[in-house]
Image (spheres, rainbow, N blue to C red):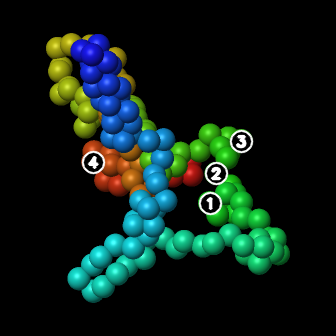
Amino acid sequence: MVRFTALFALTACLVGGCSVLPASGPTARAVEAGAEVSTPEGLLARYELVDVTPAVIEALRGRPLDSLLASFGDKRPSIEPVIGVGDYVAVSVWEAGSGGLFSGPLVADRFSAGSKSALIPEQAVGRDGAISVPYAGRIHVAGR
């Protein structure tokens, strides 16, 4: 009798757990309940529920097919690499002689090689297609 009671209790726990375990997707009731949301102005439709009938199928057959290319445009990379908005660009500034904006001061008692360079760290190309370069301001780089 004890063995039967223990088996019955174990079975009840296992079967009862099925009602609280996550499912593989929303239930029909959850989809219907989520179609409208209550706002202070009233009910707001989040999406439309449509019964798929033969008439709906016929109406959809006459409609041209949508394509992602038509919706978003041709975004394939160009044949030649071009800088675009969101790309990251690093700039090297080369100076022809010493004593410039990015090189150290001119020292008379040492020989100077002349040209110097400075690396401006990577920065994202802004929505306006430009980056900031010290002493030069905003430089348009998109499309170059």
Q: Which mark is residue 75?
A: 2
Q: Nearer the viewer, residue 85 or 134?
A: 85
10 Å crowding of disc 1: few (<14), some (14-19), many (20+): few
Q: Which mark is residue 135?
A: 4
Cα–Cα span, label 4 and label 3:
33 Å
Residue at image position (34%, 72%) is 37
SS at mark 1 in the image: helix
Residue at image position (41%, 59%) is 30
Residue type at numbered disc 3 = Ile
Is there CB contact under 8 Å for labels 1 and 2?
yes
Is there CB contact under 8 Å for labels 2 and 3?
no
Is there CB contact under 8 Å for labels 1 and 3?
no
x, y percentage for residue 18? 38, 36
Residue type at numbered disc 2 = Lys
- State which tag comes first along the sequence, 2 or 4: 2
Horizontal side of 105 relative to 41 (left or right) equals left
Please, is residue 123 above or below residue 33 in the view?
A: above
- State which tag comes first along the sequence, 4 or 3: 3
Which residue carries the number 1 mark?
A: 72
Cα–Cα span, label 1 and label 2:
8 Å
Q: Nearer the viewer, residue 65 or 113?
A: 65
Cα–Cα span, label 1 and label 3:
20 Å
Residue type at numbered disc 4 = Tyr
Cα–Cα span, label 2 and label 3:
12 Å
x, y percentage for residue 32? 45, 67
Q: Quadrant of the N terminus?
A: top left
Which residue carries the number 3 mark?
A: 79
SS at mark 4 in the image: loop
Horizontal side of 118 relative to 54 (left or right) equals left
- State which tag comes first along the sequence, 1 or 3: 1
